[in-house]
Image: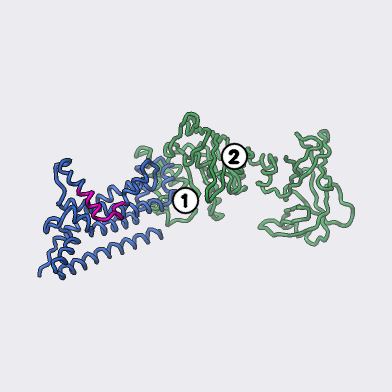
Amino acid sequence: MAVNWFPLWLSLRVAALATMISVALGLWAAYALANRRFRGKDVLDTLIGLPLVLPAPVLGYYLLVVLSQSGAWFGVPLVFTWQAAVVASTLHAIPLFVKSARAAFEAGDRRYERAARTLGASDWRVFWRVTLPLARRAITAATLVAFARGLGDFGATLMIAGNIPGKTQTASIAIYDAIERGNTLVARILVLVLSAVTISLVYAADRLEEHSVSE
Amino acid sequence: MMEVRVAKRIASRLDSAAFSLDVEFQAPPGITALFGPTIAGKTLTLDVIAGFARPDAGRILLDDRILFDAASRVDLPPRLRNCGYVLRRDALFPNMTVRQNLIFAAQQQPGLERHRRVNEMIERFHLTDVAARRPQEMSRGQKQSCAIARALSSSPRVLLLDEPASGLDAAWRSELYRMLREIRADFEIPVLLVSQDLEECCQLGDEMLILQEGRILQSGRPRQILEQPAGVDVARLLGISNLFQAEITALDPGRNTSRVRFGDKELTGPYFPGHLRGDRVWLCVRAEDLRVVRHDGARPEANQLAASLLRVSEKSRSVRLEFSNDISVELSRQEFERVKDNKEWLVEFPAGALRVVS
């Protein structure tokens, strides 16, 4: 029988978008957590890490409550759309990204940043020209891991995006769906593909980290 | 001209004891050497000036600008302080070539001026061959030249150098000294040179500050400090090994003489202005200024002490003899050859070599 590849494409698309959002938001959070002292730092730290430990239905419930209001806020209802899957994926990708990126910023040698500042560079310039380029391998690795995580979210996605084939059914949900229906072949193919992609990503990320250490 | 008066206390932490810095000095254009042992507060002083450590009290002036003033709560961030700071470990950006490093530093200037300045630095410090290289591909000495060139590219009003010669071989060291002399001549800015190498401080320093445990023990021209250390601590830091507790028993300004007693011996020295008869002082004599003669059994002449030789250590250019009573003598190799068969020794203290410090 023909395998429906839509769930896989949807997952890739969702993961890609979730990763972009995670990097865009996570870079600042990671930099701030690594370098700054500010009020509510502990709270921010805890909040970012929360999605990793909260039971999926609990997170899903919160998201459901928040997103169901989105119609009122943005004029677009988000619940049970593929965009909702992006939100769920992002929440799971951000903590992983921030954790690794923060570690990379903290491990980086401060002397380069110090030198840059004595040379009259603004914080912004120091970040883009010195801090980020020096941490680029570790940041790339963190991005890959975030992508891998975003690819496979299940619980929260199921609760807020639902299981609408051809619309919100991501790969993880398709696997669950296929097994429920006794469609083991489809389940196996998707499992193999997802495993292969995830393993390659994590492997690549580990190699990058290794290099960044030896550099 | 730079004026620094700062105090800072650092509470003890897991890996370090409590430390307090309390220094006041002026650095005119030219090289001011900060000399002192490992934990003297030399680097902390530079960090405070550059804005990486915040003093509890005091004021830092650079030309007509206030960099820091505790009373009026002025505390400029490092990027506005115009301090060219060459950190102890080289901090050239590894993701940029040498030229890019210099351009990064010169970004304050408008485009045309920036390139003119970078090119000037590259030529002045003979970096043309390495301009396109990255720091990882250069030797330690080349990196140090680049680091100094980069600091100067930002047109600083003071140059801070933290042990710039550490880890350099002799050839690069003399190249560095040549560079620093050139900078002293061509840039009219104060240069603060932190060093643990007395030779380096004396060679390069127009002024020298002796630091210990966060305090300035003495400041002045290096020659002057070597001639007359302000106290026994300074004498120790200067490596003067013959330090004896002594008492002045006679002073004669008319004949420019004095008598100093230490242990059961009395020596004749020059007149010591500012001291009184009966003063308890430290007698200090450089090991190089002492002489040794053979003891042939006759009564020792004035200023000669009988001593027994305990140890001989060979140095690169001299030989050091350690005698009883904590007396050390440093002889040139030739001199040592002449006396090495001595059995009994007399150590002669030339009157002019005696100094007293309190």
The quadrant in which the C terminus of chain B is found is top right
What is the drawing colour of chain A?
A: blue
Work out whether residue A120 or residue B173 is closer to the camera in this orientation and state it: A120
Q: Which residue is mark 1?
A: B90
Q: CA distance from mark 1 to mark 2?
A: 25 Å
Residue A175 location, quadrant: bottom left
Q: In green, which chain?
A: B
The image shows residue B299 at horizontal and vertical percentages of 89, 52
Q: Residue at x 74, y 45 (%)?
A: B284
| SS label for mark 1 | loop
Query: Mark 1 or 2 closer to N-term?
Result: 1
Q: Residue at x 43, y 47 (%)?
A: B122
* Residue at the spot of label 2: B206
Q: Is residue B352 left or right of residue B140?
A: right
Q: Main secondary structure of the magenta part?
A: helix
On the image, the x and y values in percent for residue A213 come to 40, 59
Q: Which label was assigned to residue A100?
A: none
